[in-house]
Structure formats: structure tokens, C-alpha cells
Amino acid sequence: MSAALIVDGLVAGYEPGTPIVFDASLRVAPGEIVALLGPNGAGKSTLIKAVAGLVPVSGGAASLDGLDLLCRPAHRRVALGLAYVPQIENVFATLSVEDNLALAADLGPREGRRQRLLAALALFPDIETRRGELAGRLSGGQRQMLAVARALLAGPRVLLLDEPSAGLSPKIVGELFARIRAIANGGVGVVLVEQNVRAALAIADRVVVLVQGRNRLEGTPAQLERDPALAALYIGRPASGVPA
């Protein structure tokens, strides 16, 4: 299957002349979950923020369905089918769940807007029952589900998720990741930046390991399991191959 999102040789960073990401590459096909892993400070979040248009890029290329992303501002990338969910501050806490969803729906195509809303609520029934509540009163897991639901209302081809499991209990992580898998099964490509290696590998189709801003490993979760020494070095897995 051909890739929807293609990133080649990307160089990006917050300050001119001080890149955090060096020559990073990424390919994501429709319906595929690519787990972007690596040690703290490897540049994982910076990479997807650069693809989303939130971090300056000084080299390389990025395209979605053959259309150049780097020449477009962030909101135009959303219109092309790229959605990004940050780790924190990803909902409007002082607005209701309903209003959060309504604002997000306005960013997507008019055609099929109601169908996307109903589909998002069906995927996340925990927030469907709280449509009148302020988003700031939701639990951490419910906020993450609302943030992902908001992203889906734009009708994305590719969804970029920045550490969605951070601060959540194992039970909630399992529920959230099962729904992320369902989103991918519906044809959306997903890039999943995660520190929870076990949870990410359980749902990923492929893994890209970033170290010091560069691609260091790539393969399926099974392939990574067969190279435990490298896994231990780059993503904190013990040499025995048992999940950390």
C-alpha cells in the first residue's frame, strides 16, 4: 500500500541554526499505525510538530497524498487531511464538550459533518454522555478521548498523536489505544509518539526509533522483539525481550 504521509530528510528545530531533528524520515500508509519511539530528547515530538507546521523546518520534504506540506501553514495542512493532537492543552477547558466538538467540526468539510460527529461520539461513548459538561471537568482519560474525537471531526487522512497515554492509568490507556486501533482500521494513518513502549508496540504495525534526531531503527514490533539488544539500547527494553 502506498504511503499517504511521506517525510524525507527533515531538519527542524525551535531556534535558527540549532536543529533538534536531523535527516528524519517517516512513511505512513492509510490504516497503518506507526509508533515513533526513542529515548527522552530524541526529537520525536519535535518531528511531528514540524510535520504539523508548528516547528520551523530548515531542510527536507514532507507531503500528504503527494501534496507538499512544508509550503503551507498549519491550518492549511489540516484542510489537506493532517490532524495533530498535542500531549497537553488539547481541549478548550472552559467550553463544554459539545462546543469543543462543534468548533472542531467547523474545520472539516461540510459534507458528512454530522456523520463524522456521530461516528466520533460512537467511538468515545464516555464523552457522548458528558456533552453538556465543561471539558475542564473531565478526567484525564476523557480529555484525551475528547481531543482525539475533535481531531477526527476534521476528517483526517493522517492523525499525529503526541504521547496520548501520558498520566493515564493502565486501564484507561488500554481503552484509549483500542480506540486508536479502531480509528486506523477505519482507514486513517496514525503516527503515535509514545514513552509507553509496551502499549505502543501492542497496537503498532511498524516502529520507527529516533535517536538524537535521526532514524536509528525501523521495522515491525516482531522484528524489534528479535533484536533485544538494540531495543534495550534505544527504547529501554531489557535484553531478555520482556517488556519494560
Image: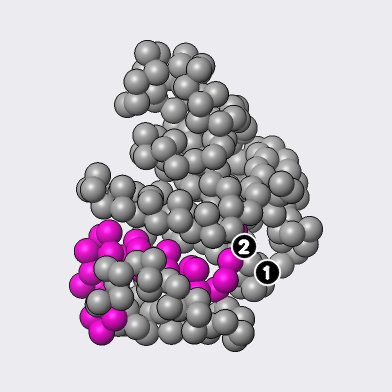
Q: State the colouring used for the structure image.
A: one colour
User: What residue appears at the point 59 percent right and 58 percent down from the top-left corner?
Assistant: 187
Q: Which residue is mark 1?
A: 80
Relative to 123, does residue 234 appear above or below in the rendering?
A: above
Q: Quadrant of residue 182?
A: bottom left
Answer yes or no: do the residues labelled 1 and 2 have beta carbons within 8 Å? yes
x, y percent for residue 219: 59, 30
x, y percent for residue 199: 37, 40
- Residue range corresponding to the magenta coloring: 131-158
Q: Quadrant of the C terminus?
A: top left
Q: Give the number of the disc on residue 98.
A: none
Which is nearer the eye, 57 or 88? 88
Neighbour class for label 2 at 10 Å: few (<14), some, many (≥20)?
Answer: many
Relative to 11, does residue 224 appear above or below in the rendering?
A: above
Which is nearer the eye, 4 or 187? 187
Magenta run includes residue 47: no
Q: Give the number of the disc on residue 157.
A: 2
Measured Cα–Cα span from mark 1 to mark 2: 8 Å
Disc 1 residue type (three-letter)? Leu
Disc 2 residue type (three-letter)? Arg
- N-terminal of the two: label 1 or label 2? 1
